[in-house]
Amino acid sequence: MVKIHSVLMGKAVQHAARLRGGSGSALPGLVIEKFDKSFVANALTKFPYGVVFISGTNGKTTTTKMVVELLESQGLKVFTNRTGSNFSRGIAAALLSDMNARGKLKADIAVLEMDEAHAVHLAEKVKPRYCLLLNVMRDQLDRFGEIDHTAQFLHRIAMAPTNSVIVNRDDPRLASRKFIDDLTAKVSGFGVSEKLIHQFPSDDDMRSLSIEKRKALFDQDDTSLESLDGKSAEIKYANKIKKVSLKVNGIYNVLNAVSAIALCREIMGEKLQEEKMLHALSEVTPAFGRGEDIIVNGSPCQLILVKNPSGFRLGLQSFDPKGYAIMIAINDNYADGRDMSWLWDVDFDTLKSGGVSELSGMRAYDMALRLQYDDVPFLHVDTDLRRSLKNFLESANNKPKRIYCTYTAMMSLRHELSKIADVKAVR
């Protein structure tokens, strides 16, 4: 049971943080974690449809947004951590925002985007009913170490659910006997057809299992991307192929949509209202900073989050640079990962013809050196994000713009853009 005095104290801190100009998304969570260590666990025990964990290296924020909107189309009221703050303190802050002063939260289900390491600890306190695991990629080496260590985190998470675990059957570490055999919940998969597999490479491109063998690891029918044409996709499940048009950008977001359908099917079961689910999916817009278009002086400025080799490669593959002014902003704060060596595993050849207008962020000169090795021309380098963004917007004139950026750079750029454009607030 949630302690009322904890709620009141947390809401007071949240209000004070917002009065000082912050979003109120981190500090209240930190305070309440210190004051009441059982707050999150107690708050997550009363949902009729239970708790869902969504974790993995890439795609958590967008997939969580998709799942929430699909479940809402089914008539469920959903609690989620909308800001993408996926540590336990972020979930605590989101709970405080949605609760009334007596600690009551009106929701049928909790859908939580979870950082891999933090999900392990929360899973020990809160048994989720469902778990969706997206992928294992080389990300934040300073935090997680090598890729197999991340897979071990996800395996511990997968041991927790009481109902079912859904995994990416095309990920060589998630779709392995070593990962799956000792799981106690029902296991099902999502993925892409064999003809599309080359468009979704893993970091190490390790595909020692054939598609057929990976499918055989799962007793349940899976959910599969069968074809892809721009923002239109054919998705197969329950021996049917459904055509869906999407508003989200990037081929990686189409795979996120497949995973969201797989999870929604699992949660709703026979109660699934299929046409409502597919219509809701067609209306989902990009999560903030994940292919988000911000109109600046009449022309679009698109923000693309990049944080590991595979994500950057897929981002470059998804968006044609022709006609766009390009900026790359690389920070190495804790939330970005301190180790930027992964930039050397990204192929930047697609940027050769048009070049890059602006390089910025703490590691702007590292990015400049990397581009020199791929013979990609660039015009201007400045580690100051505010000054660099101003120069980029002025030099690009009325051309459409695209910014590839790490997480903290993206948050800073959104803040600066909000001063001159309509930027959707995330609470």
Image (tube, rainbow, N blue to C red):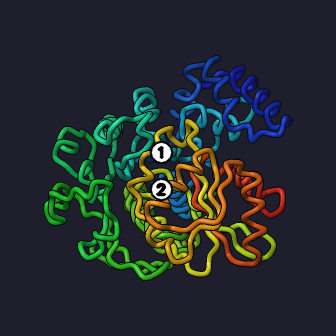
Mark 1, other Cα within 10 Å: few <14 / some 14–19 / many ≥20? many
Label number found at residue 340:
1
Is 142 in front, or is 103? 142
Residue 62 appears left or right of 391: left
| Residue at the right extreme, as displayed | 19
Label 2: few (<14), some or many (≥20) within 10 Å? some
Q: Which mark is residue 50?
A: none
Nearest to the observer: residue 423 or residue 242: 423
Q: Is residue 192 left or right of residue 132?
A: left
Q: Is residue 81 visible?
A: no
Residue 417, given in percent of the width and then of the height, sits at: 76, 58
User: Measured along the vertical axis of the image, is residue 156 above or below residue 217?
Assistant: above
Q: Nearer the viewer, residue 408 or 18?
A: 408
Q: Amino acid at mark 1?
A: Met
* Residue under the point 47% across and 67% down: 375
**Residue corresponding to mark 2:** 370
Q: Residue at x 37, y 61 (%)?
A: 262
Q: Vertically, is 31 above or below 401?
A: above
Residue 108: horizontal and vertical position, in percent?
55, 47
**Who comes first in sequence, dot 1 or dot 2?**
1
Disc 1/disc 2 C-alpha distance (Å): 11 Å
> Would you say residue 198 is visible in this rendering?
yes
